[in-house]
Image (cartoon, rainbow, N blue to C red):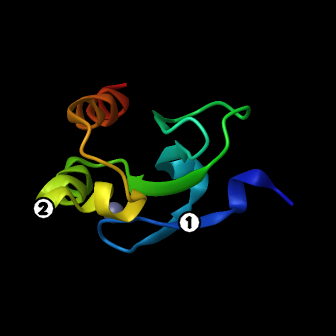
Amino acid sequence: MDEKNIIRKCAACSALKPRSELIKITLNKSCGEVRVMPGSDFFGRSVYLCRNIDCVNAAFKKNKIFRILKIKIQETLEEKIRAVLEK
Ligand SMILES: [Zn+2]
């Protein structure tokens, strides 16, 4: 299967998009680490967001993204995601 055609849903606006067009945020349950756009060697529960500021803002509104991932609030996560947007 072509990796680029895997469809995922944005956690903020629920739009369905090819995974390659989304920001991937992965929680590795065994170490508790959260990575933004992890490499292929980092596995875990993932959420996806559109590459736009509205969806990033919506994901952090009322800490939605942390509730989805079921983790404590991490102050640095929003910064990391914004850095991806700026690329
Ligand atoms: Zn979205």
Q: Is residue 26 left or right of residue 59?
A: right
Q: Is residue 5 above or below residue 52?
A: below
Q: How many labels does the image show?
A: 2
Ligand 1 contact, mark 2 (Cβ < 8 Å): no
- Of residues 16 and 56, the one drawn nearer to the viewer in this rendering: 56
Q: Is residue 23 above or below residue 49?
A: above
Q: Name the residue beneath numbered marker 2.
A: 62
Which three-letter amino acid code belongs to the residue tagged 2?
Lys
At a point 47% along the width and 57% down the height, the residue shown is 47
- Of residues 87 and 10, the one drawn nearer to the viewer in this rendering: 10
Q: Reading the chain from its start, which is encountered first: label 1 or label 2?
A: 1
x and y, in percent, of residue 5 in the image:
70, 61
Q: Name the residue beneath numbered marker 1.
A: 8
Indicate the quadrant where residue 74 lies: top left
Q: In this view, does 7 lie to the left or right of 83?
A: right
Q: Quadrant of the N terminus?
A: bottom right
At a point 76% along the width and 52% down the height, the residue shown is 3
Q: Distance between the residues labelled 1 and 2?
A: 23 Å
Indicate the quadrant where residue 6 lies: bottom right
x and y, in percent, of residue 68 in the image:
37, 64
Q: Quadrant of the C terminus?
A: top left
> Where on the image, by quarter, is ligand 1?
bottom left
Which three-letter amino acid code belongs to the residue tagged 1?
Arg
